[in-house]
Amino acid sequence: MASGLTTRGRCLLAGGIATAVCAIVLDERDLLRIGLFVCLLPLVSLLLALRTRRSVRATRSITPDRVSVGSTTRVALALRGGVVTGALRLADTVPDAAGVVPDAPPRFTVHRLGSAGTTVTYPLRPVLRGAHRIGPLSGRALDALGLVELTHEVLPSDRLLVLPRVAALQGVPVALGGGEGTPGAAVAHQGQGSPDVLIRGYRQGDELRRVHWKSTARHDELMVRLEERPWRGGLTVLLDRRDGAHRGHGAGASVEFAVSMAASVGVHLLRRGEPVELITENGTSLGGAHGTDALLDALAVLRPVSTTSLAGPPLATADDAIAILGALAPGDAEVLAERRPSGGYAILLDVATWDRGRSSPVPAATSTSAGAESSAAALRRLGWHVTVATAGTSVERVWDAVAAAQRVRVS
């Protein structure tokens, strides 16, 4: 808290003291009265400003206090108290990431409260996920003559939780399962007729007895027969949050795209009734079993880590797997394959296309870098279906490519 006389108030007080001293030396009573009045004026203003500061009370409400990136929330400050003498200038502390709207900065001047008080509001449009602190609210009480200024904290800070952006996705890869509205997986036999047989390309670890020789001859490569869709134990989504595997800063960083991708996939599949567990590269669970709210809350506060390896506990072989990956160093693909020998779906971010010098998304890249192509090829050799995502590509387009993964249906 800072309080005291302004430059004008200090000059007036100094002038009043000098006048009073001169009046005493010269034995001028009238001049002494003037000097004393000038001295008392800033002191009386100080008392009135102290009264204003102590009498004003404030409450803050954020509606809603849990929003997605790019959405709008509104902050309301309700002020109550006694008569305001002079002016009360209020300023709420808001981080840039919380999205202060330039046309409506959180600064206000109150000249009168009235018996019912007053309420002032301002909008926020967050540009970056996270738990942001809104506040503290500071106030400056000024007297009408501008002789005194008192600064103090009117209200402590409140929490605004900004969730990652969630895109509306459509469909799922065939290997992920059942028909619309069927939780888990659909049963292969429905009514009369032949089993619903699926085939796919051979992956390392597949049993040779499941090779579908007729389709192998037709496609000139080993194809594996899936005679039924087993009841799945769930779906594991692995999110690579390693700081060294990503590029860019702020909302335009590749790690933010990865988080938004994970949030969109998790919410999409949970709403379809799929059992989903979201984990980080080292196996730390971020939720999914407790619903979309818990999953999004965990992703909102997720931060990159300095870990350089993809090593971690094995991924459940009974589950389907989707890995959202940053840049892969030599050996990373093999480490991932050790954790899940049967492969899965990989969304590989071509982080070289993310501009390190920008804080907003860059235009869509037109080609894939050599490093990403090499990593994608390594993953494919190990049985992963790979979709490469470049900067500026939408989450929806990437998921459409994943959902269109090659699965041949035969009877």
Image: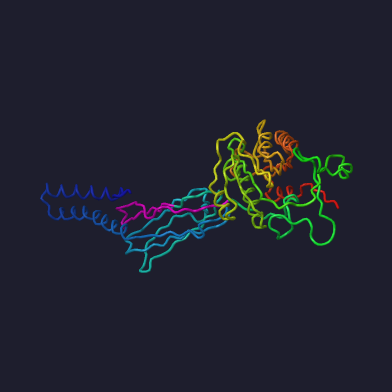
Of 393 and 345, the residue lying toward us: 345
The residue positioned farthest toward the top in the image shown: 330
Q: Nearer the viewer, residue 234 or 95?
A: 234
Q: Is residue 182 left or right of residue 117?
A: right
Q: Is residue 67 above or below residue 246?
A: below
Residue 145 against residue 407 in the figure, above or below: below
363 falls in the magenta region: no
Q: Name the residue furthest front.
A: 209
Q: What's drawn in magenta, residue-wise?
A: 135-163
Q: For the view shown, which residue lies furthest in the left direction?
A: 27
- Tag count: 0
Question: Which residue is at the front of the view, 257 or 364?
Answer: 257
Q: Position of residue 128 (x, y in %)?
A: 55, 48
Residue 293's image quarter? bottom right
How is the model colour-coded?
rainbow
Left or right side of 62 for 154 = left
**Residue at the image point whose x is 23% and y is 48% from the top:** 15
Q: Measuring 69% from the left and 37% from the top, which residue is drawn there?
A: 337
In this orientation, which residue lies closer to the viewer: 363 or 285? 285
Tell me residue 56's x, y (percent): 34, 60
Q: Provide the major secondary structure of the magenta segment.
A: strand
Residue 60 locus on image (x, y percent): 43, 59
Q: Is 405 displayed left or right of 237 in the figure?
A: right
Asked if the stretch drawn in magenta spans residue 154, the answer is yes
* Residue 400 position in % (x across, y down): 73, 50
Quarter of the image where one finds residue 215: top right
